[in-house]
């Protein structure tokens, strides 16, 4: 049985739908068509009892279009972060007004939720986002999520709404994340990849960069798929130009690319705390050797100083940090027991030497296994 057939046999209760800037372009009536398509698809799955969240890009491009066409102000070709923030401030309310108009006659209130990576660093804020979404569901509203570009800084950005949508899928405990794109799906060796249960180095290499007014590309979509696999969700990359991409996919039509776990993958879904760790903004991390990597993955061990080869960034005790291999592959994330300078003083020392010098003031573990989310 194919992954797709296997997936479609499971009950689907919650869907996160993400649409990018390129599909919301205000040229040639494309935005109007896309808004009508989103309305059609969201109303259709709601009739089937499936809850939906929409993650929408487009605030910056809407602001750019507004100043250029309404106020004859020429935008910068490569805007700085502060200019993007300004364009987002101009465009965000216009974008939401468009959504409000298109869902009004269907009797669906739309709710704006602007999020930064800071909110995923703060566990209390993270949980409160989840509570707000649940309340919106209770009253029948459609949550529309976007990154809060007007206040996000470089170090506190998701960087692309593909990653934000994967974070929302994990928080929402969605069964499926759908990313609508301007192409047929993920192209690998000249052909559409129908399905996969793992993100390989070959797939990463084949992924291209950004194309169009957004900042993402297939690289970020693959990363979103990787995060979905770890969290226990599934991702479908579907063509936004299709007449009914989501409902057709759910009906079994062979479109797009599905990234999901196989039936033989018996990993449990990550607990809420560890899902949070996957998406919490980090200030740096550690590079570990192969032996330490095996210990984390195969034995569920805590991270000890002996396996750490170097550190990067600037972090303090209690920060969420990345764990990477010597080949620069992401291995996981966790809460650091020690700061970057403290860990630096432990490098190259045995556990006995670390204790003898009084460096292990909070235990020998750099990251305790209860505070680790491992990427398999």
Image: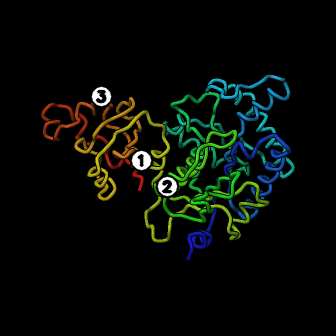
Give whichever of discs 3 and 1 has the lower sequence position.
1
Q: Nearer the viewer, mark 1 or mark 2?
A: 1
Residue displayed at 40% across by 34% down: 284
Q: Residue 8, position in %: x, y?
A: 62, 70
Camera-side residue of 205 and 288:
205
User: Which disc number belongs to residue 231?
Assistant: 2
Give whichever of discs 1 and 2 has the lower sequence position.
2
From mark 2 to mark 3, how far is it between C-alphas? 31 Å
Secondary structure under the numbered disc 1 in the rendered image: strand
User: Which disc number belongs to residue 330?
Assistant: 1
Q: How is the image coloured?
A: rainbow
Q: Image height check: is 359 above or below 8? A: above
Camera-side residue of 129 and 95:
95
Please tell me how crowded label 2 is: few (under 14), some (14-19), or many (20+) other residues with Cα within 10 Å.
many
Secondary structure under the numbered disc 3 in the rendered image: helix
User: Which disc number belongs to residue 341?
Assistant: 3
Q: Residue 263, position in %: x, y?
A: 49, 71
Please tell me how crowded label 1 is: few (under 14), some (14-19), or many (20+) other residues with Cα within 10 Å.
some
Of the 4 image quadrants, the one containing the N terminus is bottom right
Of the 4 image quadrants, the one containing the C terminus is bottom left
From mark 1 to mark 2, how far is it between C-alphas? 15 Å
Q: Residue furthest bottom?
A: 1
Q: Nearer the viewer, mark 2 or mark 3?
A: 3
Q: Residue 16, position in %: x, y?
A: 64, 53
Please tell me how crowded label 3 is: few (under 14), some (14-19), or many (20+) other residues with Cα within 10 Å.
few
Residue displayed at 79% across by 26% down: 67
Q: Horizontal placement of 270 versus 66: left or right?
A: left
Q: Image height check: is 339 above or below 44? A: above
């Amino acid at each position: 049985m194919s992954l797709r057939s296997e997936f479609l046999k499971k009950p689907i209760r919650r869907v996160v739908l993400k649409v990018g800037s390129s599909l919301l372009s205000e040229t040639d009536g494309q935005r109007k068509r896309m808004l009508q398509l989103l309305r059609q698809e969201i109303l259709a799955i709601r009739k089937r009892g499936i809850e939906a969240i929409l993650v929408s890009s487009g605030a910056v491009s809407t602001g750019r279009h507004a100043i250029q066409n309404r106020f004859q102000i020429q935008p910068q070709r490569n805007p700085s972060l502060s200019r993007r923030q300004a364009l987002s401030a101009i465009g965000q309310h216009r974008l939401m007004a468009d959504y409000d108009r298109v869902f009004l006659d269907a009797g669906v209130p739309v709710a704006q939720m602007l999020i930064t990576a800071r909110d995923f660093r703060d566990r209390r804020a993270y949980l409160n986002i989840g509570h707000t979404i649940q309340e919106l569901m209770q009253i029948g509203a459609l949550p529309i999520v976007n990154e809060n570009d007007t206040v996000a800084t470089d170090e506190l950005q998701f960087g692309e709404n593909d990653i934000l949508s994967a974070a929302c899928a994990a928080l929402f405990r969605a069964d499926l994340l759908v990313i609508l794109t301007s192409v047929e799906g993920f192209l690998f060796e000249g052909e559409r990849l129908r399905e996969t249960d793992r993100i390989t180095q070959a797939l990463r290499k084949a992924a291209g960069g950004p194309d169009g007014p957004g900042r993402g590309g297939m690289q970020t979509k693959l990363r979103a798929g990787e995060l979905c696999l770890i969290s226990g969700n599934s991702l479908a990359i579907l063509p936004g130009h299709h007449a009914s991409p989501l409902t057709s996919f759910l009906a079994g039509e062979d479109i797009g690319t599905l990234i999901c776990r196989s039936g033989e993958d018996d990993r449990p879904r990550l607990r809420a705390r560890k899902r949070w760790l996957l998406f919490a903004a980090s200030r740096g991390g550690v590079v570990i050797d192969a032996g330490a990597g095996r210990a984390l993955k195969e034995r569920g061990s805590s991270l000890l100083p002996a396996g750490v080869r170097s550190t990067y960034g600037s972090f303090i005790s209690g920060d969420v940090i990345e764990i990477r291999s010597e080949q620069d592959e992401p291995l996981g994330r966790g809460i650091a027991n020690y700061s970057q300078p403290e860990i630096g003083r432990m490098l190259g020392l045995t556990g006995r030497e670390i204790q003898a010098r009084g460096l292990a003031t909070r235990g020998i573990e750099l990251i305790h296994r209860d505070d680790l989310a491992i990427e398999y």
